[in-house]
Amino acid sequence: MPYLTHDFSIETRGQGLYTITREVAEWLAAQTVRTGLLTVFIQHTSASLVIQENADPDVIRDINEFFKHLVKENAPFYRHQSEGPDDMPSHIRSVLTATSISIPVVDGRLVLGTWQGIYVFEHRAHPHRRSVVLHLAGDAK
């Protein structure tokens, strides 16, 4: 069973969801694995990954607003504040989501639903370069 890896970076512009579906699907299409499992992993503790609706931009806006209300900045009980008021909330948001996701691969394609996309969820207020690692395991046919 072949195991393949790939890494890439994505530039964020501050808090929000940034689609990476195209980058992931293009890399996958160039591989010989036809059936398997793709793991997507982000190498950060203040950003995460989600699979979410990719059709209506209001969904993305509502998710951003929900997390702003759910995890507030400047809470008086936060001890970790050396990197700014958005840092501790970004770690909490990351805990509530995921740093890795697994997606089945069938016929060399991601098995995502019609309206699903893969997103980097940036939790920090300022732009960052985020590193994403792909790990594919499966059978070539």
Image (tube, grey):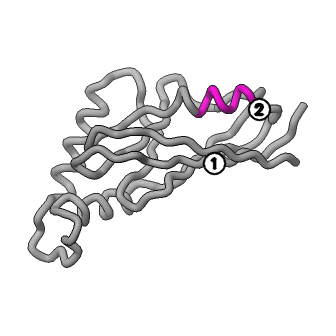
Residue at 15% x, 62% y is 85
Q: Residues within 10 Å of mark 2 (few under 14, many from 20)?
A: few
From what the image shows, is residue 33 above or below residue 1? Answer: above
- The reply to whether discs 1 and 2 touch (Cβ–Cβ < 8 Å) is no
* Residue 99 percent coordinates (x, y): 48, 55
Which residue range is magenta in the image? Answer: 24-30
Prevalent SS, magenta region: helix
- For the residue marked with disc 1, what is the amino acid? Thr
- Residue marked by disc 1: 39
Q: CA distance from mark 1 to mark 2?
A: 14 Å
- Residue marked by disc 2: 31
Residue at 30% x, 51% y is 123
Residue at 14% x, 60% y is 73
User: In the drawing, does residue 28 fall left or right of residue 91?
Assistant: right
Question: Which of the two labelled residues, at mark 1 and mark 2, occupies the earlier sequence position?
Answer: 2
Q: Residues within 10 Å of mark 1 (few under 14, many from 20)?
A: some
